[in-house]
Amino acid sequence: MYLGNKKEENLRGDKLRELILWVYLHNKYEKDRIRMSFLKEKVGYQGPGGLYSAINSSGYFDRKNDEITLTEKGVDYLNRKILPPYKVFSPIGDFLIILGLVFLLQWYSWTYLSSPLVTPWYSAIICVATGIVVRVFFMRVGYWIMKHSRKNA
């Protein structure tokens, strides 16, 4: 993408992209501070200098004491390049919730207003519940699965 006189910076390396995502997810869903050994294991940095170099010199991370957060540059890269594939689940969840509510209205009209039934009530509940899970809990469940897998790399 070309923005005026600036060219978009391309991020080299899958490990750095994964590191940005891990730091974001950990800061969003965990209460404790992120450990360097946890990041080494999940992202796959081998040597002791690789992870520290990526955090200290990339410009995507801000490290104060034991806390690692994303800088404005890191948040911008995360929102433009990493999160868009995950954000597709939000409209899918919204659609399922609306579809489930329509099914509930159809069930209500059949039960109490004696108009033709198109869908049973339990299909409506399943659609609404699935929509809520997809809309609200998808990233949290995905993070939990990634965190508890043996090796991410």
Image (cartoon, helix red, strand yellow):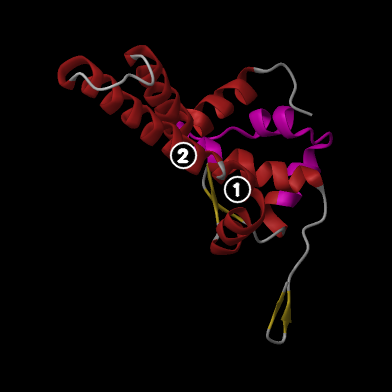
Q: Is residue 61 visible?
A: yes
- The residue lying at 26 percent from left, 27 percent from top is 105
Secondary structure at numbered mark 1: loop
Question: Residue 148, percent across and down?
Answer: 62, 18
Please determine whether, in this image, residue 63 is positioned above or below residue 126: below
Of residues 123 and 19, the one drawn nearer to the viewer in this rendering = 123
Of residues 104 and 79, the one drawn nearer to the viewer in this rendering = 104
- The residue lying at 82 percent from left, 49 percent from top is 13
- The kind of residue tagged 1 is Leu
Quarter of image, res 73? bottom right
Q: Which residue is mark 2?
A: 28
Farthest residue to the left: give it: 112
- The residue lying at 30 percent from left, 21 percent from top is 116
Secondary structure at numbered mark 2: helix
Q: Which residue is mark 1?
A: 83
Please determine whether, in this image, residue 68 is positioned above or below residue 150: below
Question: Residue 77, percent across and down?
Answer: 63, 59
Numbered label attached to residue 24: none
**Residue 116 horizontal side relative to residue 63, left or right:** left
| Few, some or many residues within 10 Å of mark 2 (<14, 14–19, 20+) | few
Q: Is residue 31 visible?
A: no
Magenta span contains residue 35: yes
**Residue 133 horizontal side relative to residue 36, left or right:** left
Q: Are marks 1 and 2 in contact (CB under 8 Å)?
A: no
- The residue lying at 38 percent from left, 21 percent from top is 118
| Few, some or many residues within 10 Å of mark 1 (<14, 14–19, 20+) | few
Magenta span contains residue 42: yes
Question: Residue 16, percent across and down?
Answer: 74, 47
Span colored in magenta:
25-54
